[in-house]
Image (tube, helix red, strand yellow):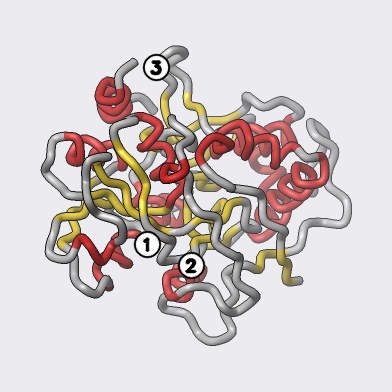
Amino acid sequence: MGAASLAVIALTASCAGSSAPDRRPSAGARPPAGSASASAQAGAGEKCDPLRSLRPPAHMPTPGGAMPSGTAMARIVERGRLIVGVDQNTYLFGYRNSDTGQLDGLDIDLVREISRALFGRPDRVQFKTVPSAQRIEILRRGQVDLVAHSMTITCERMEQVLFSSDYLDSGQRVLVDETSPVKTLADLAGQKVCTARGTTSLTELRRARPAVRPVAVADWTDCLLHLQQGDVAAVSTTDNVLAGLSAQDPATRITGPRFTYEPHGIAVPKTTPELVRFVNGVLARLRASGALRALHERWLGPYGNFYPPAPRYSD
């Protein structure tokens, strides 16, 4: 199916690539504790470390068995389903598969593994698709149990929600038409650059010097359409998201070095720290078994060196 068709399908779904060197995001070294980029430290005190999450329990409950009394996990199992906020417009992470009509992607697979750890089966999930700008709001309102939505962990967001351990490292770069002379963000000075509302990417574009002209839209597929139609000169966000956009349109390329550092986590309400520990236990098992690495290879292998980072925990 053509690139434009893929983008339109993703954009209009209203229910709930090439391996050339320039298309492969550069991996960038992971900074030591306390030295995350300005994006990851926005609005935070000196003691904030966005790479640290709550330690998993010493012993995980048996999948499909009784969960500890009074916990979020017990309430979820009693309800009979896990309710999760996800994306349906980010190819490779959370998107609606046009062949099956089902949600698919790395984030979706991680949610199914959490369901498996709770219920002993991967399909006890109610997905709620939500725009990037509303991810924290639906958590704080208690409309979902967690959010798995290609979400960067920042100190500013950590004041409002809790995050799992980092399951994906990436960084912000630029996507342009393959005929564009642009090599870095600085080459886009004064030009329109598309990104999504409610994201760290929009914050970084507003900080950019020399200045660009950010165009904020609801979903990443909107950005791809704007680029295809010549309404913007580029799209800028984390290179994992750009990899999905580039995979949908081979006439685009990812360019320039990373200019932010972006650890990704699964978000939960501050009122349920035990659920963060449980999710971290699931991620720890996936790391130990090699399954998390396999998921990265399945979804991102052709597009860059996106390997599961080692977790950092606090008590």
Query: At 40% across and 58% down in the image, what residue appears?
Result: 172
Residue at 32% across, 27% down: 10
Q: Left or right: where does residue 115 sit relative to residue 8?
A: right
Amino acid at circle 2: Thr
Dot 2 surroundings within 10 Å: few (below 14), some, or many (20 or more)?
many
Q: Secondary structure at mark 3?
A: loop
Label 2 or label 1, whichever comes before in sequence order: 2
Q: Is residue 166 left or right of residue 144?
A: right
Amino acid identity at mark 1: Thr
Locate residue 1, reporting x and y percent. Answer: 34, 15
Mark 2 and mark 3 residues within 8 Å of each other at the beta carbon:
no
Sequence-wise, the earlier of marks 2 and 3 is 3
Which amino acid type is shown beneath numbered disc 3? Ser
**CA separation, marks 2 and 1?**
9 Å
Q: Farthest residue toward the top?
A: 99
- Residue annotated with mark 1: 200
Identity of the residue furthest to the bottom in this view:
46
- On the image, numbered disc 3 is attached to which residue? 98
The residue located at (85%, 38%) in the rendering is 62
The answer to whether the residues at label 3 and label 1 have Cβ atoms under 8 Å apart is: no
> What kind of element bears circle 2?
loop
Is residue 92 in view?
Answer: yes
The answer for how far apart the CA atoms under marks 2 and 3 are is: 33 Å
For the point 23% across and 49% down, which residue is it? Answer: 234
